[in-house]
Image (cartoon, coloured by chain):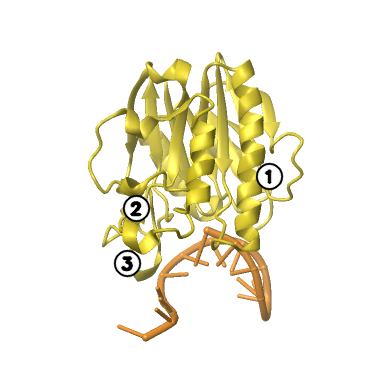
Chain colours: A yellow, B orange
Amino acid sequence: MMVASWNVNSIKVRLEQVLEWLDSAQPDVLGLQELKMQTESFPVAAFEELGYHCAIEGQKTYNGVALLSRHKPEEVTRGIPNFSDEQKRAIAATYKDRRVINLYIPNGQAVGSEKYNYKLNWLAALTNWIEQELAQHKNLIIMGDFNIAPDDRDVHDPNEWQGKILCSDAERAALQKLLALGLNDSFRLFDQPAKTFSWWDYRAAGFRRNRGMRIDLLLVSDALSNTTLASRIDTEPRGHERPSDHAPVWAELS
DNA sequence: ATGGTGGTCCAACCA
């Protein structure tokens, strides 16, 4: 089973690139973030033609997440239960014996800002929810744009980013608290090349200079860690014309 | 040099 995650930064602009990637990579599940489109406008027919079901949580202009899948989604959950949020950032579904959660975690703008506090509150609500999900679903996969670089290996220049947004102690501690529930960063279950990133700023030729961060993650529950066969980042689409600023990340599970 | 690019949607916000 191949699972993948991609922040597409507008599904309208990136539709052809996503269809092309699905056709070549053939994942069983693909989580998309930053649709920037209302649910009713989502191009369902284009994905159904490739044999994918769609579960969508969209909104106008900002945010928005979707799960595309070979199998029919069951038990679809939209948003974090019992957490009031205008911003559409979470969707979950069950496929056979596996629960998949797709997240677009808030960016947080700058440490100490109002958006940063929203991010930390969001992460606290997420952790409460995931604790409940894990109690019900041993086989849990959490994917998405976490907007957190787990540690300094995931940052092109750790000194430059020390204590800044995506790297601050409180964000990293929140991620560690989530992992401590019984989840694993699938990428780090394997040897990986140094300086492997999933996001590069559009500005200042970030991709060409590999000034990136690894902020797109695929977490697998303890029950699934021994069944995880590979976890990679496909940087190829980031070099396309009119690319998303994020690359797709994927994992293969037995 | 404290910017820069890109998406949404047309002024200003978000990343």
Q: Quadrant of residue A40?
A: top right
User: In the structure shown, which secondary structural element does the residue marked by tag 2 occupy?
Assistant: loop
Query: What residue sits right under mark 2 in the picture?
Result: A155
Tell me if label 2 and label 1 are in contact, CB under 8 Å. Answer: no
The residue where tag 1 is placed is A39
Query: What's the distance in space between the residues labelled 3 and 1, CA to CA?
Result: 33 Å
Residue drawn 33% across the image and 60% down it: A159
| Disc 3 element | helix
Which one is nearer the viewer's eye here, A48 or A207? A207
For disc 3, the marked residue is A205
Q: Is residue A42 left or right of residue A28?
A: right
Mark 2 or mark 3: whose residue is earlier in sequence: 2
Query: What amino acid does circle 1 point to?
Result: Thr
Q: Which of A127 and A93 is in front in this view?
A: A127
Can you tell which of label 3 and label 1 is closer to the viewer?
3
Of residues A252 and A121, the one drawn nearer to the viewer in this rendering: A121
